[in-house]
Image: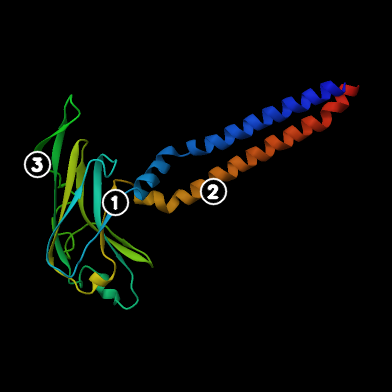
Amino acid sequence: MEAVRVIKIIVVVICATCIVGYLLVSRSLWFPELEKQIRISHHGLTKPVDLAQPGLVTWKISGDDWNYEGECRVSLMVDKIPSIPWENYQKASMALQVKMDAYAITYEPTASGKNIEGLRANRLIRNWYFKTDAPLSPNARIWESGNSSGTEFGLCGVQRYPWEDTYVLFEIARPDNVLAKANPRLQIVGEYDYAVQEHISWFRIFRDSVLFLLIVCVLALARMAIKHGPSRANT
């Protein structure tokens, strides 16, 4: 009977371990589309820029630099500095004015493994939302967000395809010596839903709470099976 008892305990432990392991692995399968949006928002590129000097900044993003295809968003990021007045972060009163453009140089792979440089193609998105190449003008209707640590000014949308090098053109038409002190940098990220970032934490709490409850139930059932198994075996 003792051998039967040991075998039952081993079977119960193995079954409980497999179920708990499955529940832990399934954690990454909850809300896959929402998690994809978060990954896109966190995997972009940045480039420091000097806002105190007028002129053209050409940002080359090679095909191997960033593994993303589709619509992209380019923005200007600046930090909140206590010594900089609040109005300097507002489009209506800031000195900075810029113009945006974007293009790509296509490459065609060959059988020998070499890439042949192709033609230059326009990649600046112009639609119902991206209506102007002067995104910091007061009448530009484009996204702008901020918090206690910094502010993001939307600049333009760019289309990115495989086998291309993307060039983002950031022309400083009127420099801004004040914002130049706020660690300015260009940022490019893939298209994602900004609302997901605000609500993803609640979805994660719900997911982890359900998984924790299920794991507790599995362990409780396993304990009951081990505890009451010997009494049935001895009858």
Whole-percent x, y for residue 64 in the image: 26, 41
Q: Please give the residue where the numbered disc 1 appears in the rendered image.
A: 45
Q: Which class describes the residues within 10 Å of circle 2: few (<14), some (14-19), or many (20+)? A: few
* Amino acid type at mark 3: Arg
Quarter of the image that includes the N terminus: top right
Q: Please give the residue where the numbered disc 2 appears in the rendered image.
A: 205
Residue displayed at 84% across by 22% down: 3
Q: Please give the residue where the numbered disc 3 appears in the rendered image.
A: 120
* Residue 18 vs residue 192, the one in the foreground: 18
Q: CA distance from mark 3 to mark 2?
A: 47 Å
Of label 2 and label 1, which has the lower sequence position? Answer: 1
Residue displayed at 15% across by 35% down: 107
* Amino acid type at mark 2: Ile
Of label 3 and label 2, which has the lower sequence position? Answer: 3
Residue displayed at 20% across by 58% down: 141
With respect to residue 139, does 83 lie above or below?
below
